Image (cartoon, rainbow, N blue to C red):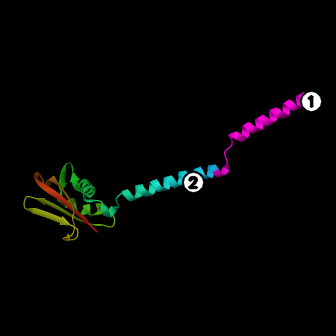
Amino acid sequence: MLSSWTRDGATRTGERRRARAQTSPVAALAALFAVCAGLSLYVTVLGGSIPLLEDRAVADPTLDRVHDVIDDGGVVDAERLPDAMTRGPDGRRLNVTLTASDDVWTVGPAVPQEATDRASRLVSVRLSPGQVEPGRLTVVVWS
């Protein structure tokens, strides 16, 4: 009789220990909801702080892409200027102008007065074989 009482007592103590280590399903769901709500709030606030394409200046990266297309060994070739029109951002219009000495080359539609997203850089321009002059490459991007 003493041995059966000990076994029952040991079983009850083990059951109590296991019962204390378990988490209530309601508490687990509440914790999961709190984590998901916090993550959603974080993403919403972060998404609102990132500027949209309309808010960003896109002329500088466009200028880099245009320069990469028309540059040949550190010298810009005016004959490659039409290839630059493929490097504009989607949904935007692009005008590319190259000036050197008294020469001006332009591709793209006419630039409206309200277009303010512009970028330019100094480049070396090949005017003819063996003749290279300093010039300026300018891009204007607008909607």
Is residue 121 or residue 41 the one in the foreground?
41
Q: Main secondary structure of the magenta part?
A: helix
Badge 1 element:
loop
Cα–Cα gap, marks 2 and 1 = 51 Å
Please give the label number shown on residue 1: 1
Say which residue label 2 marks. Answer: 33
Which residue occupies the extreme right position in the image? Answer: 1
Does label 2 or label 1 sit earlier along the sequence?
1
Badge 2 element:
helix
- Res 102 → quadrant: bottom left
Please give the label number shown on residue 129: none
Label 1 is placed on what type of residue? Met
The answer to whether residue 32 is above or below residue 84 is above
For the record, the magenta segment spans 2-26
The residue at 39%/59% (across/down) is 48
* Residue 7 image position (x, y, % from top left): 85, 32
Q: Is residue 89 visible?
A: no
Magenta span contains residue 5: yes
Count of numbered badges drawn on the protein: 2
- Res 10 → quadrant: top right
The residue at 54%/53% (across/down) is 36
* Residue 38 image position (x, y, % from top left): 50, 53
